[in-house]
Image (cartoon, grey):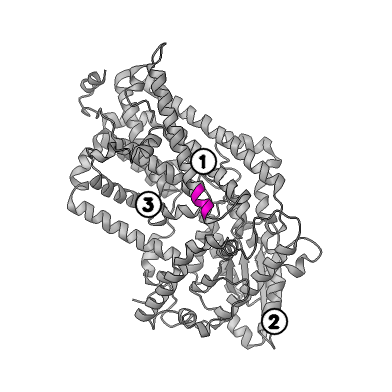
Amino acid sequence: MTGRYSFGLALPVLAVLAIAVAGQLLPGLLVPALAQSAPPAAAPPLTECDVPDRHTEIDFPLPQVTKAIAAKKLSVLVLGAGSSQLPGAGGAKNAYPARLQKALAEKLPGVEVTVATDVKPTRTAVEMLKSLRQSLTDAKPSLMVWQTATVDAMQSVDGDQFGQALAKGIKIARSVGADVIFMNPQYSPRTESMIALATYVEILRWVALQHEVPVFDRFNLMKSWADLGTFDLYSATKKLDMAERVHDCLGRLLADLVLESSKVHSPETGNGNEPGK
Amino acid sequence: MAKRQTKENPLIGPLPTERDLRLDLFRGLALWLIFLDHIPSNLVSWATIRNYGFSDATEIFVFISGYTAAFVYGRAMQITGFIVATARVLKRAWQIYVAHVFLFAIYLAEISYVSKTFDNPLFAEEMGVLNFLNNPDVTIIQALLLKFKPVNMDVLPLYIVLLLWFAPFLWLLLRSPTLGLLVSVAIYTAAWMFGLNFPAYPSGEWAFNPLAWQLLFVFGAWCALGGAKRLARWTHSKIGIALAFAYLAFAFGIVMTWYFPPLGAYVPAFVGEAIYPIDKANLDVLRILHFLSLAVITVWLVPQSWPGLKSPVFWPAIVCGRHSLEIFCLGVFLSFAGHFVFTEVSNRVFMHVIVSAAGIAIMVGAAALISWYRRVERQGPGPRPPAIKTGYAGSEA
């Protein structure tokens, strides 16, 4: 498994080079997230399931989360489908929303962290919109984590329709004062030849970029785990232990992304996507 | 016979009689690339063109298929008339349909196996994709109607639809190439303006919209029927080649931002607004331009008379391109098999290289076998196939 990764070594190297060059050429225009990831000392400590190239994405600010942390009360809503839950009696306790809550609470001492969920399996983005307003009213979150795209890909929903649903969800969440983070699909090697995820992952990324929404790139993260041998995602088992560890890692890394993004300031020149020429 | 047809249609002039080896070569290469791209997470697919620009091997395949279809059936239409040529085109569509159903049967076998042997609570949601096995009464019928199409099984249905309406198109192209091309452009434009596409099952639309992709197929046919010669003044000019290079460089730069997101900071927002999303289903104009740029540069670098085309180095790709339907189907099957090896045996880099190389070797071996058999069949006793079939190096479009 480690050998497979060596092929992709060029990626992080080039990415670091690119950041360095970008930092040289456009110091004032780039979002602080880039500057943040450049000196290793400033980077958050790596957890054991973290992967080296995770911090290279451009981060967008989460102003409501920043405010909520300052006010010592952070409320999160997880909107998702089947891959946001685990089966069994301990499912709710071990799935990533609960792990996110635990990780945030540990990293934000003195802040009251609550995580509500609106999770039901086999829902497309359009279907999730139906219960969204009610869930937002109930949870009054400062942040909505939206896990989606898997079911849309499985049902090969029309791409435009999917993109519009995402944009609408962002609008609804922001209208009630919640920031949004997207979580893209899981990397599922066994079903890879049966679900055409790529198009939907790309649409999600593009909508996120347009609306300045950070993406928790679960797909590439899990792919890196498979490459590095962190988890054996190929294994056929009815046991829950690996699934629980995966969700624990997802929860903690998601907490990292929330905290990193909450420290990103909104620059006057706009966001990292616009060079401000 | 080949001479007679040139007199019959003074409007369009003689169709070239010698097979352009470049068509076989690049179609063969496209088939290899499609095979490599269809194995999920295949590391070797980093080498394929889709990672360096907007278009991929599908464009090459569709264009060359249109080109050779016009070449083969255009001649047939001139010699035997509209009705007989139409019957031949439809027979070809039927063959492709049968091939598609055969591949679907293999796909069913693969996923039935996965659904029985694989279980992991982490992927409970994803395993839902196998649920259609629970109602085969609906899904198999939808598959036969070409509405239910598993992942990576979209190209043959596209090809079938393109051939179904190809005969009248060809008739028009033989009489007025410009008008034929304009009709094609009009259909493409209408598909974009009104969002027209074929419905799919259980939801959504075709992953390759035939109303959009027909443009490349018809453009290929138009080039075969003399259009390429008329374009040569532009495509061989310094400006044409420089523009093609410039566009390829632009596309390369944009694609690099997909792999190295920080580079995205250099893409001005208005450029992003203008180009995204690059619509593969509806054959985005950016993809067409990318394919055309590749074609201009390829034709410039590799002239038809280049003696190297006959060298044994290119023979493996040429022989694959010559039997494109068989080799395409084999490639789809091999990509299923390749993914199966990754999940069941090993997923190391080494295995990716072995599976990719072995797959291409099997494709070449099968193509060589088909060539050999066609030759034997032609030479053997008994009634020979009509000359019109053998006249084109034993291959259909």
User: Residue at horizontal 48%, vertical 68%?
Assistant: A209
State the separation of the CA atoms marked 2 and 1. 50 Å
| 3 or 1: tag closer to the N-terminus | 3
In this orientation, which residue lies closer to the viewer: B385 or A218? B385
Is A130 displayed left or right of A52 in the figure? right
Is A183 displayed left or right of B308 in the figure? right
State the separation of the CA atoms marked 3 and 1. 23 Å
Residue B354 location, x and y as percent? 50, 48
Provide the residue designation for mark 3. Answer: B287
Give the mark toward the camera: 3 or 1.
Answer: 1
Chain of the residue under the numbered disc 1 shown in the image:
B
**What label does residue B132 carry, if any?**
none
Quarter containing the N terminus of chain B: top left
Please state the extent of the stretch shown in magenta in the rendering. B350-354
In this orientation, which residue lies closer to the viewer: B315 or B261? B315
Q: Is residue A204 magenta?
A: no
Provide the residue designation for mark 1. Answer: B332
User: Residue at horizontal 66%, vertical 57%?
Assistant: A123
State the separation of the CA atoms marked 3 and 2. 48 Å
Q: Quadrant of residue B77?
A: top left
Residue B349 location, x and y as percent? 52, 56
Provide the residue designation for mark 2. Answer: A105
- Taking the view exactly as shown, the residue that stands out farthest to the right is A89
- Above-or-below relation of B257 to A140: above
Is A263 displayed left or right of B253 in the figure? right
